[in-house]
Amino acid sequence: MALWGNKDSKTASGTVRLFANGLVTGVSTSFTTEAKVNDYIKIGKDYVISGITNTTSCQVISGVVGGTITANAAGTAYTLSEKPISVTFSEVPKTKGSGQPSEVFGVDTTEVGVTQGAGHAGWVRRIAGTGGRNGRVQYETLVAGSSISGDQANDTEFADS
């Protein structure tokens, strides 16, 4: 098992339903070929896939230590990502910053060239300032890598042009 992948967005066929116990059931999904254990699955918020039963069923845990699972209705769209798993399992969760997979983005070389201050292509944490730091943005490269592919729909944070 790799600690991180290079796909910001993976194919995510079909739709899903998430139950409060972490069971995910899908319609027209292909979990056995499109997902892996420890991939992030975003169903409203980020969760981590802890087991794959078959093409239409998997189990998830919260993407934040101590977080809860929020059930969703059937027919919900979802995304898959290979974000660094250490964001969930090795960091102390905070309101902003570490321990928050929703603030980690796969940034390719084009996005680095467009987003001033983004630093380096790879897995980048973006922290927007609040209070006296409102309007300021801090970037931290967690894993440098120019091989990031499969752009997620995060273009408000990291534009492509």
Image (spheres, rainbow, N blue to C red):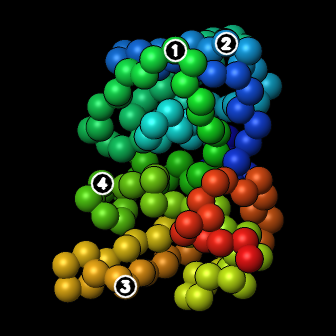
Residue at mark 4 = 93
Residue at mark 3 = 136
Q: Distance between the Cα atoms at labels 2 and 4?
A: 33 Å
Q: Earlier in the sequence, mark 3 or mark 4?
A: 4
Residue at mark 2 = 27
Label 2 vs label 4, nearer the camera: 2
Q: Earlier in the sequence, mark 1 or mark 4?
A: 1
Name the disc covering residue 74, or none. Answer: 1
Quadrant in which residue 73 is drawn: top left
> Is disc 4 surrounded by few (<14), some (14 to 19) or many (20+) residues within 10 Å?
some
> Is disc 2 surrounded by few (<14), some (14 to 19) or many (20+) residues within 10 Å?
some
Residues under numbered marks 1 and 2 in contact, where contact means CB atoms less than 8 Å apart: yes
x 65%, y 72%: residue: 159
Callout 3: helix, strand or loop? Answer: loop
Where's residue 134, x and y in %? 28, 81
> Is disc 3 surrounded by few (<14), some (14 to 19) or many (20+) residues within 10 Å?
few
Q: Earlier in the sequence, mark 2 or mark 4?
A: 2
Look at the image and tell me whether residue 4 can be seen.
no
Which quarter of the figure is the C terminus placed in?
Answer: bottom right
